Amino acid sequence: MAAALSAAAGRRSMAALSGGAPMDTPQKNNVTVIPTGAALGADVVGVDLSKPLSDETFRQIEDAWHSHLVLRFRGQQLDDPALLAFGQRFGELDSAPIHAGKDVVNPFPQITVMSNIKVVGKPLGNLGHYEAVWHTDMSYNDLAPIGSLLYSLEVPPAGGNTGFSNMYKAWDTLPAALKKQVLGRYCRHDSSRNSAGELRKGGTEVTDPRDAPGAMHPLVRTHPVTGKKALYVDQIYAVGIEGLKDEEARPLIDYLARHITREEFACRLRWTPGTLVMWDNRICVHKAFNDYDGHTREMIRTIVNGEVPA
Ligand code: OGA
Ligand code: MN
């Protein structure tokens, strides 16, 4: 079994070997940003993320991120350190991600393996049928992550896409009466459930969701850079609203949780191996499409630590 596990772990370091580039000269800036044409998302071409980025290139990427919320970089060759080096430019990385693959030694605590691979019946990473409803990562933390970076090592021949939805648009299109109802209200983000909606080990069932453990965040938050308002709600963690009885809060959350999934706010990204997708976790929700039974999907993820939503 140890051999099988290390063979599986070795797949990640094989991807690592091909990255090698001189680490001292920043590359020439040839960045082009191609919007998806949908409500959010853009491809960024002309940049090799395994090499150091000049401040100018980095600023261009950061500006594109703030404009398009989700960026996709295809044809990259990143190993764990290269993913972390790029992620770190956006802020401090979270070093306590969830590790389903507990038998696998992970030398990089800021990396989470997202995979449906099982080795001798044990999951090598997270995901599987997790992350399959619209959510924003770790919103149950007081300092909710500002961004997530997900890099694909192996993807199924078809399916396994990721959907994203633009929460500026969700806020902008909310009927005026509802805007009035939610503005200034705080919502509980339940930390007792995982992203599949299942109670975590040691979590306790509560009768009133306002009593659930986890952070309270404003239902409408303002992006610190763009200054624009966005709805901040999802389909897993958002469970109760301060100042409202459960009977009043539940239909409101249900309405909002449906509203955020409208097709016109969304894009759906397809992966090829060596694709990095990074999203603004403050302003979009996302969802995995688990429609690739019988095929392998393996990714690594790192999370940029958060700020208190305002
Ligand atoms: C995640 C996530 C979606 C996917 O990494 O947080 O939700 O398609 N991933 O893998
Ligand atoms: Mn997620």
Image (tube, rainbow, N blue to C red):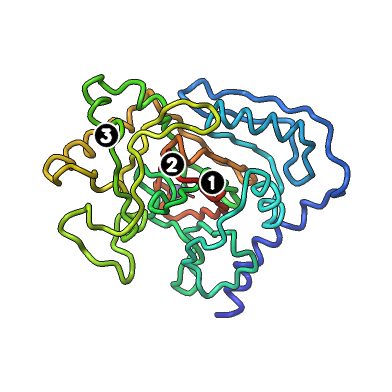
Question: Would you place residue 70 above or below residue 109 in this image?
Answer: above
Check disc 2: other Cα within 10 Å, few if <14, some if 14-19, many if 20+. Answer: many
Residue 256: x and y in percent read 27, 34
- Upstream in the sequence, badge 3 or badge 1? 1
Residue 140, relative to residue 182: is it above or below? below
Element type at marker 1? strand
Instruction: Report whether the residue tagged 1 is closer than 8 Å to ligand 1.
Output: yes
Type of amino acid at the residue the image marks with label 2: Pro
| Mark earlier in primary sequence (2, 3) | 3
Q: Residue at x 26, y 32 (%)?
A: 182
How many angstroms separate mark 2 from mark 3 (CA)? 18 Å
Image x and y of residue 175, in percent: 25, 20
- The one of 8 and 50 positioned closer to us in this rendering: 50
Distance between the alpha carbons at the discs numbered 3 and 1: 23 Å
Q: Residue at 49%, 66% (x, y): give it.
A: 99
Q: Residue furthest left?
A: 247
For badge 1, the amino acid type reads Ser
Compared with 17, 30 (above or below) is above
Which residue bears the numbered disc 2? 309
Query: Ligand 2 within 8 A of label 3's CB?
Result: no
Q: Amino acid at mark 3?
A: Leu
- Residue position for label 3: 256
Provide residue 124's location: percent of width, then percent of height: 51, 66
The residue closer to the viewer here, 140 or 298, is 140
Front residue of this view, candidates 144 and 100: 144
Q: Nearer the viewer, residue 268 or 141?
A: 141
Q: Are marks 2 and 1 in contact (CB under 8 Å)?
A: no
Q: Secondary structure at mark 3?
A: helix
Residue that mark 1 sits on: 148
Seen in the image, is 292 located left or right of residue 212?
right
